[in-house]
Every structure is written in structure tokens, then in C-alpha cells.
Image (cartoon, rainbow, N blue to C red):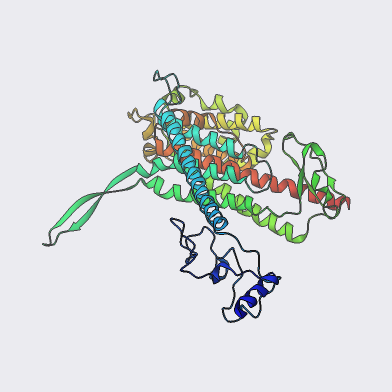
Amino acid sequence: MEDLSNSDGNYDLGYQPSPSFVDQNDQSIPETPGYSTLSGESFVYGRTCSETSAFSDPIDDHSCCSEASTSHWPPTRSMAQNQAVLSRLGTKQQGNEDEKQLDYLESLELELEMMKDRFAKLLLGEDMSGTGKGVCTAVTISNAITNLYATVFGQNLRLEPLNPEKKALWKREMDCLLSVCDYIVEFTSKSQNLSNGTALEVMKSRPRSDIYVNLPALRKLDAMLIEILDSFEDREFWYAEDGSVSSNSSRTGSFRRVVKRNDEKWWVPVPCVPPCGLSEKARKHLRHKRDCANQIHKAAMAINSGVLAEMEIPDSYVASLPKSGRASIGESIYRFMLGTEKFCPDYLLDCLSVASEHEALELADSVEASMYTWRRKACIKHSKPSWGMVKELMSDVDLSDKNHILAERAESLLFALKQRYPELSQTSLDTCKIQHNRDVGQATLESYSRVLEGLAFNIVAWIEDVFFVDRAVTRQE
């Protein structure tokens, strides 16, 4: 009776025994299938042993009676409520797993659809009618890389990190387009010794030499350019559309200056700098990234020029060559190239005063046509009909021959012209080579190096725009 009264007194104080104190033989919590009440590993959340119970706080068995109070013990849940909580946890875990599985399946389906699209375009040659009038595989891959570059970087006209979705698109699609190079191989002989000492010569495949050398270099240049853009996440300058101050004007130092450039590239956003100009740290960072992008541009341009030089000259271009290189290049340039003992192409370009990119491209086309005309005349005594043998024939040509001298000087003039105008478009010969090229490996390397060359040049130009505005603001101050 005394024990009973004590028990009643506890209930009068608001104390109710926790389910953990109930006799396990009388009441036991049934385990939900797939879950264990003794292990926290089966729950979706990683909890410690003291966190697995959702019903009561951890208690010491020896001090529970003396420390029981209404402020310490939470209300007791019924067995049905406990079952409902466990059921909801299991349902939530199963729902999260199903959602992850659905997302994974959707990503696989998107990649599969992309592969189908690429495979169909390669087979059809971009001719959706299926009549076989499409372009060759090499031209299809070249166009695909060019179009992908326009999609990813066409609207990115600022020094800022690339959108994560576009960055993932660029990496995923380029990996798909470049994967064809993994199967372009060449066979070389290799000596192999058998167990009995017999030496055998076997053929071993390896990546073709031009792909083996240039493709890893282009991938490295690609990663470096993306890294340069990512480095401008935190910057002191920003951009204003149409010469208006952007919403960033609410930052520290609300007064901002916008300097307009007097050039024809009106579509490029105008950079803005603080009223006191950029800090020395920001200028040092910009100079470093400009130098890196400039070196990347030179490397990509060298790879592109080398690949184009290895492409065969189409017969259609040879047929369109003028009969006289003198008539193609002009009388004044011809006399300057032939009349001087030491030819200086830079001095000739200074005298010509090329005013626009269009004039520079016309000059490059005429100089290149004259160069191949003079080379053909220098090799005319050989009865070899193939134009692809010109480089081999030039080794047999008399170095004092006038046509050979003019061809060499025309080549140096063309090189100096491309160095002075790095943004120069492709010449007629380069365009003709790309259109008539049938080598898939060369088409891949040429298009990849071309788009990287363009991106590197744009980055250098954007940095120069920031320096231009910074100098203008500093002078005004």
C-alpha cells in the first residue's frame, strides 16, 4: 500500500514513466521491417547513439527517480505514435532514394539522347533529308566544335566565370567530339623477344603523331583559359550595359564612372572602375592574366597554323591561282619585294598603311595567292603533277631563282601580316582547306585550336578594355 501511495504521489506530481522503464516482457516496441531500433546506421541521417531516440532524453538508470520533474521529462508518446514516426522516417528515406534514382536516370537519358544526336549528324553529314548530299565526317566535326563554341562562349563577353551549366555543357560535348581521336592510330614496328630467345618484329598501334602531340596540349590550354575566367569571380571592376551604371553601384563608393570607347565594337559591354581607379593588386592580377592569355593565344595559333600547313591544297584553289603573281600582288609591292637586297616585311607594312581588317584580309589573300603562284613556277621544271609534292620539290629548287626568292619573301610578309593583325579572319586558302579536308584528325585539331585561339584573343582584348578605362579614370582624377 505504501508503494502504491508513492506511485500515486509521483503521478500527482505529473510524472509519467518513460517507455524505456516499462517491463520489456509486457511492452516491447515492434521493429519496423528493414530498420533496427538498436542501430543508427539504418536511418537516413547519421546520428550518434545519444541522438537516435526521438521520444525521450538520455537518462541515468540510477538517478531517474530522484531527478524526475515535469520540466525534464517530455510527454510520453503512445506505441501507435512511435510506429507512425518510424513509418514516416522510412517513407522519407525511400522517397529520397527514389528521387536520386530518378535524377540519375534522367541524366543518363539526356546523355543517351545527346549521343544519338551526335551519331545521327555524323552519319547524315548534317543532311537531314537522308539523300546522301551531306558533308563529310571531318567537316561535320569541325562545324560541331565551332557551333558549340558559339553556344557556350558567344554571349560571354565579360571577364567573369563561365556559367556552371555552360561549363558542364562545354566539357561534356567536347569530350564526346574529341573521343573520335582515341581511335585514330598508326602502326609502328616493335621488337619482341620470345622465351626461347627468338626476336620477333610485331606491329603495335599508338595515337597518330600529330594527335599525340597536339591534343593534350590543346586540352591543357582549354583548362588554363577556363581557369583565367574563374579567377575573375571577385573583381574590383564591373560592366555597364549601353553606357549605364549597373546595379553594382550600391557597393562601397556609390559614385562610379563609365568611360565610353570610340570604337566599332558597340556590342561589347563597357567596363567600369571605382572613381579612384583600380588598386595595384588588381592591376597586377590583370597584367598576369593578360600575359598568360597572350601566351595561350600564341600557342593555339601556332598549332592551328601547323595543322593548316599539313592539309592538302584543294585542286579548286590551285585552279583559281593567277597566272602572274606580279598582277595579283600589285606593281608597287612587287617592285619593293624584288628591288631590295634585304627584305623587311614590317617596313613594307608600315608603308602600305593598312587602315582596316578588311584591307588586311584582302592583302593576305593576294600575298598568299602570289606565294603559291611563284612556288609553282619554281617547281614547273619537275614533271610531278601532285601539288602535295611541292614541299619536297622546293628542296631541289635553285635558291637563287627569282621565283623562289619572291615566294620566300611573300611568305615572310604573310607571317608579319598575321602577327600584326592577330584578329584577322581566315584567308581564302585556309577556308578552302577546311571545306575540302577529309582527314578527321586534322579537322578536329584545327577547329579546336581555332576556337581556343579566338577565346584567348578575346580575353586579352577584354583585359585591355579594363586597362583603358582605368587609365582614363586615373587621368581624369
Give the residue at the far front of this rendering. Answer: 1
Q: Residue at x 80, y 45 (%)?
A: 247
Vertical order, 9 against 423 (above or below): below
Residue that lies at the very extreme toward the left in this rendered image = 196
Percent x, y of residue 185: 33, 44
> Which one is in front, 404 or 145?
145
Q: Is residue 30 left or right of residue 463?
A: left
Q: Residue at x 67, y 48 (%)?
A: 160
What is the x, y in percent for residue 268?
72, 38
> How many badges with numbers are in the image?
0
Q: Please tell me whether residue 45 is drawn above or below residue 309 in the rendered image.
A: below
103 over 201 or under it: above or below: above
Any part of residue 371 in sight: no
Q: Taking the image as drawn, is residue 111 in sight?
A: yes
Residue at figure coordinates x 74%, y 40% from the top left: 269
| Viewer-proximal residue among 475 and 400 | 475
289 in relation to 333, above or below:
below
Location of the N terminus by quadrant is: bottom right
Question: Image quadrant of residue 168?
Answer: top right
Q: Which residue is nearer to you in this view: 373 or 71?
A: 71
Residue 441 placement: quadrant:
top left
| Quarter occupied by residue 418 | top right
Viewer-proximal residue among 31 and 224 = 31
Please give left or right for residue 181 compared with residue 10 in the image: left
Residue 143 in picture, x, y percent from top left: 50, 32
Residue 162 appears at what percent x and percent y?
Answer: 62, 46
